[in-house]
Amino acid sequence: MPTVLLIGFAPESIPGFAPGAVAAQLDEGSRRFAEAGLTEDQCLIDFGDPHPERKIVEHLGRGPYDAVVVGGGIRKPAELLGLFQTVVNLVHWQQPRAAIAFNSGPTDSADWVVKALEQRRNR
């Protein structure tokens, strides 16, 4: 079974955000990973953590991973561009063989991982 690391924000750590709905979507996303035959590991970082790279590197070191999803709001808003760049580089440096995938929300991560793994196989 391919293994996947999902990197995103812990819903309960985002100020002014109702975490219940996102937690339910993460659960749905996990169900879809299982249905797709993918083993999922989650690295949910604290929105207010000044050094999230420590936790990310720790999780990346648990690999190898076949794919890594960068989601959970890390790509947007523009103020998070520096974090997004850091996360992508950490994935590239720590897991150079992993396909990198992005999602539009917690429930479609498995779909994007399958596409990224197909792209890697076909190159």
Image (spheres, helix red, strand yellow):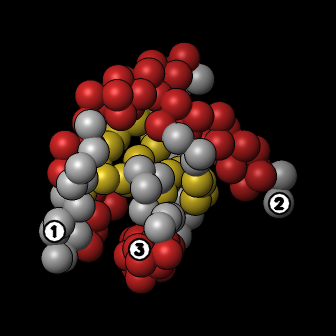
Give the residue at mark 3: 80
Label 1 element class: loop
Tell me the CA gap for discs 1 and 3.
13 Å
Report the front residue among 108 and 123. Answer: 108
Q: Amino acid at mark 2?
A: Arg
- Number of the front mark, 2 or 1: 1
Q: Is residue 116 left or right of residue 64?
A: right
Q: Earlier in the sequence, mark 2 or mark 3?
A: 3
Please give the name of the residue rendered at 65% of the width and 34% of the height, measured from the top-left corner: 111
Q: Is residue 54 left or right of residue 22?
A: left
Q: Earlier in the sequence, mark 1 or mark 3?
A: 1
- Examine the image and state in which quarter residue 100 appears: bottom right
Report the front residue among 106 and 33. Answer: 106
Disc sitting over residue 11 in the figure: none
Give the residue at mark 1: 49
Please give the name of the residue rendered at 53% of the width and 41% of the height, measured from the top-left corner: 105
Q: Position of residue 70 (x, y in %)?
A: 48, 57
8 vs 18: above or below: below
Please give the name of the residue rendered at 46% of the width and 28% of the height, measured from the top-left corner: 29
Give the residue at mark 2: 123
Q: Amino acid at mark 1?
A: Asp
Report the front residue among 61 and 18. Answer: 18
Residue 2, visible in the rendered structure? no
Label 2 element class: loop
